[in-house]
Image: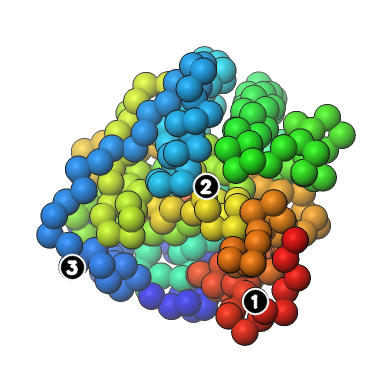
């Protein structure tokens, strides 16, 4: 595993494989698991845990969420208020998109240096082998791309994605206040939640991930282990298993698909704000021999140029800040060249003494 960007371009070209048509796993896709997690091999006793499933409509939800965030950095929620019909409509547009012939999809390719559009995940560039997946990223309106993909039928699909963005943004605002309140941080303590204190000033991307059925799933990887750069990621997976979360740095735990549930994960930015009390979990997506898999990830990020830093309410002489202040714009730039972006902004012991706490 390289720590700086060395490997593949993240743009799909005509020369790339059409994964659906392959009967044998090409060498370029034969995954080599990075030696990132040495303790994975050392422990023989499995942790027989499942990711907490929380009913957001119940009064004990905030308490359970606080606990899940401090232990797993993740949980699943039901009764979250996002209409299931909308989730299914977004998912069905994603299925239609990836089913289009490759030359069509290439018309909506990401252009170098930008995120929106069709291609492979940014993190491909850090790994020596290719991942068994394709993706489409939506930031703002997908109109220009959708017009190429569905010249006669783009408008309704744009409306669905706009509605998905509104609903998920509002859910993320709710979840942000729960996560912060559980740390004792109140509305008076945050000055970047926007005029209505609902985090509507935050930005987001909707990432559609598609994992075709794979002829040799044990030797391939859908999406390699990574942490998200976000504040929060809220993910819907279809009814096919694949998402795995690294538990206590030592065991991959499969997140069981639950109809209508959404998986919530802490991202690096919330790890910074919480001064490491909430940790962004490593996660990966494995693939399947017979079933294709689809996930829709909502990546909720801070306003572009506001500096995020460990919240001062969480700091004291024995708990000094672990990270230096950084904006989303600067941090995503660091992460585009460094796999472990958080280590690049960690305050080391000698600097800690110089940082004023309080
Ligand atoms: C908001 C974002 C998070 C993301 C980078 C991006 O600007 C848009 C794509 C996102 C995504 C989705 C798949 C996994 C991930 C690591 C990647 O390669 O692209 C995340 C990025 C991230 O969290 O850094
Ligand atoms: O497909 C999945 O379950 C994981 C997707 C993911 O990690 C992401 O989009 O960041
Ligand atoms: Fe992710």
298 over 238 or under it: above or below: below
Q: How many other residues sit within 10 Å of disc 3, few (<14), some (14-19) or many (≥20)?
A: few
- Identify residue for label 3: 42
Rendered view: 139 above or below 34: above
Question: Residue 78: where, in percent of width, then height?
Answer: 45, 21
Pointer 1 or 2: first along the chain: 2
- Horizontal relation, residue 211 to residue 350: left or right: left
- The N terminus: image quadrant: bottom left
Where residue 222 appears, as percent x and y from the top left, is: 35, 52
Q: Secondary structure at mark 3?
A: helix
Q: Is mark 3 within 8 Å of ligand 3?
A: no
118 to the left or right of 191: left
Among numbered discs 3 and 2, the one appearing first in the sequence: 3
Q: Identify the residue under disc 2.
A: 266
Label 1 sits on residue:
352
The quarter of the rendered structure image containing the C terminus is bottom right
The image position of residue 191, as x and y in percent, is 82, 45
Q: Residues within 10 Å of mark 2 (few under 14, many from 20)?
A: many
The answer to whether one can see residue 254 in this image is: yes
Residue found farthest to the right:
195
Whether residue 91 is visible to the viewer of this picture, yes or no, is: no
The vertical placement of 89 against 27, above or below, is: above
Which residue sits furthest front? 317
- The earlier-in-sequence mark between 1 and 3 is 3
> What secondary structure is marked by label 2?
strand
Please state the horizontal and vertical placement of residue 231, each as a whole percent of the image.
61, 48
């Amino acid at each position: 595993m390289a720590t700086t960007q060395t490997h593949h371009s993240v743009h799909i070209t005509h020369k790339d494989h059409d994964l659906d048509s392959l009967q044998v796993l090409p060498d370029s896709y034969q995954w080599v698991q990075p030696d990132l997690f040495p303790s994975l091999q050392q422990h023989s006793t499995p942790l027989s845990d499942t990711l907490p499933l929380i009913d957001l409509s119940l009064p004990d939800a905030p308490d359970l969420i606080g606990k899940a965030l401090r232990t797993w950095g993740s949980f699943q929620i039901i009764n979250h208020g996002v209409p299931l019909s909308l989730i299914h409509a977004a998912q069905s547009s994603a299925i239609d998109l990836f089913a289009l012939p490759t030359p069509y999809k290439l018309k909506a390719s990401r252009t170098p240096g930008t995120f929106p559009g069709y291609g492979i995940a940014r993190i491909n560039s850090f790994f020596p082998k290719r991942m068994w997946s394709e993706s489409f990223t939506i930031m703002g309106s997908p109109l220009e791309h959708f017009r190429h993909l569905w010249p006669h039928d783009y408008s309704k699909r744009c409306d669905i994605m706009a509605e998905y963005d509104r609903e998920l943004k509002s859910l993320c605002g709710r979840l942000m206040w729960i996560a912060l309140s559980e740390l004792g941080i109140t509305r008076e303590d945050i000055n970047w939640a926007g005029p209505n204190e609902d985090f509507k000033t935050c930005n987001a991307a909707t990432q559609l991930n598609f994992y075709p059925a794979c002829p040799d799933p044990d030797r391939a990887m859908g999406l390699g282990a990574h942490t998200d750069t976000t504040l929060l990621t809220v993910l819907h997976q279809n009814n096919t298993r694949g998402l795995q979360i690294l538990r206590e740095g030592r065991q991959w735990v499969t997140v069981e698909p639950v109809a209508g549930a959404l998986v919530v994960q802490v991202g690096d930015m919330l790890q910074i704000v919480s001064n490491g009390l909430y940790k962004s979990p490593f996660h990966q997506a494995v693939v399947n021999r017979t079933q294709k898999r689809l996930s829709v990830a909502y990546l909720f990020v801070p306003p572009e140029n506001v500096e995020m830093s460990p919240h001062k309410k969480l700091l004291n002489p024995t708990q000094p800040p672990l990270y230096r202040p950084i904006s989303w714009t600067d941090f995503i730039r660091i992460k585009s060249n460094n796999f472990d972006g958080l280590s690049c902004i960690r305050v080391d012991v000698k600097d800690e003494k110089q940082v004023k706490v309080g």
